[in-house]
Image (tube, rainbow, N blue to C red):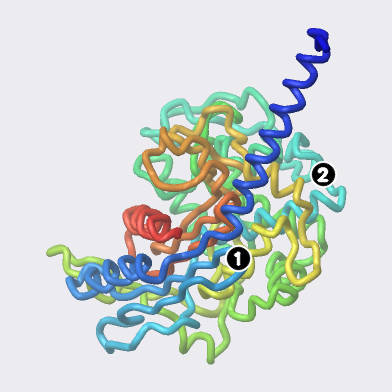
Amino acid sequence: MMIKPYFKILFISLFLLNTDAFAQTMAEKHHATTAISQERIARYDTYLQNEVDQGRLAGAVTLIYKNGEKAHEKTIGYSDIESKSIMNTDQIFYIQSMTKPIVTAAFMMLYEEGYFFLNDPVEKYLPWFKDLKVAVDPSKGIAGGTVPAESKITMAMLLSHTSGFSHGIAAGKLEEEIRNAIYYTPHENIESRIKTLVTLPLIGQPGKQWYYSASPDVLSLLIEKFSGMTTAEFLQQRLFVPLGMKDTGYNLNEEQAGRMATLHTYNEEGKLIKAPDQTPTSGNKVFAGANALFSTAPDYAKFAQMLLNGGEWNGKQYLSPKTIEIMTMDQTNGLYKAPGQGFGFGFGVMTDVADAKSLGSEGTFYWSGAYCTYFFIDPKENLISIMMTQTAPFSGFYDQKMRQLVYQAVD
């Protein structure tokens, strides 16, 4: 019997559709059954141990979860190179910018409760965000003159670092002025810091560039405005306690302070030494969104697993899978310039593995902290990797090594 062209096309289409569905199912089954090779992950341990032996690294905690199970955990070296204190799995680290994803997640919990739209102008909730100025020449700082902001800063711009704010940590006169005003000048609380920040010129026009910034500090202040709690209280009640993140917070008690990893740096000869100034572990009143949290690798893994689970942990839904979806897609429309990378809401995002020239998967999201703490979450491989050290200044070197040596061990 002759098959009519229409039915032939329909038959072929259904065949291809079923083939695609079958291939996708097989790929999902493959990722669900892959594991971390214990033989191959030993290369990661050996590499880091050699870094310790060569005096380039004091010590580290590494933690890997695959398919919801702990696949590898290792402590290497020392928490303090002077006392030769051994690094422990419950070592506490000052995680700096790894605070940003946590505060972003908290902020998006309030988004889900209807407090704001992502395209809302920030000035709707914080009136002193009106009439912002933009630096004409950031290299000359405030003295270089300003022009009016051409558009309003939105919530989405804060979340994606496209607001025009700076962080005060890069080189340049304006960066130095911002750094002195918001970090080296005492502030009573996060509102005081943000009210100071908006008196300074923006580094660029809102929405016109991706520029790493202290925007999550504004998110922290908005959390306080919407929730009626301090950000410390909100995080404790809504995330840390229910997730079981018992060693995460803005201040440490006496027992926790005893588990704090020592900050290390390098002297003029390039030798690793104990940093002269150590991180204060108590008395913090500025509950920042850009930095300032302490945590452990096991605690951070719980937060990461919740995100990887589509916002769920132990039967409780913290965020919708759709919210995590929008948080982990590129929101910068090409403004984020790292090859193969984009930036979502609170996370860097892998958009093109070939362009990135790095092992990984499209859709992997990640970030790091200024004292060399790192993590990534790979939904395709159902994989979480965390590495905690405590070294200044920041380098992305060990982040790249973590990816290289973890992915090569996927079996």
Residue 236 lies, with reference to residue 146, above or below; the image says: below
Taking the view exactly as shown, the residue that stands out farthest to the left is 269
Asked if residue 287 shows in the view, the reply is: no
Residue underneath mark 1: 286
Specify few, some or many for label 1: CA neighbours under 10 Å numbering under 14, 14-19, or 20 or more: many
Relative image position of residue 221 (x, y in whole percent): 70, 55
Q: Is residue 280 or residue 334 the one in the foreground?
A: 334
Q: Quadrant of the N terminus?
A: top right
Relative image position of residue 271 (x, y in whole percent): 17, 69
Q: Quadrant of the C terminus?
A: bottom left
Specify few, some or many for label 2: CA neighbours under 10 Å numbering under 14, 14-19, or 20 or more: some
Amino acid under disc 1: Val
- Secondary structure, mark 1, is loop
Q: Is residue 72 left or right of residue 1?
A: left
Taking the view exactly as shown, the residue that stands out farthest to the bottom is 255
Amino acid under disc 2: Phe
Relative image position of residue 356 (x, y in whole percent): 41, 38
- Secondary structure, mark 2, is loop
Pair 2/1: label in front: 2
Relative image position of residue 92 (x, y in whole percent): 48, 78
Q: Are marks 2 and 1 in contact (CB under 8 Å)?
A: no
Residue name at image x 51 percent, y 72 percent: 297
Q: Which mark is residue 116?
A: 2
Alpha carbons under labels 2 and 1: distance apart: 24 Å
Asked if residue 350 shows in the view, the reply is: yes
Q: Is residue 272 or residue 404 the one in the foreground?
A: 404
Residue 65 lies, with reference to residue 349, above or below; the image says: below
Q: Which mark is residue 325?
A: none
Residue 86 lies, with reference to residue 175, above or below; the image says: below
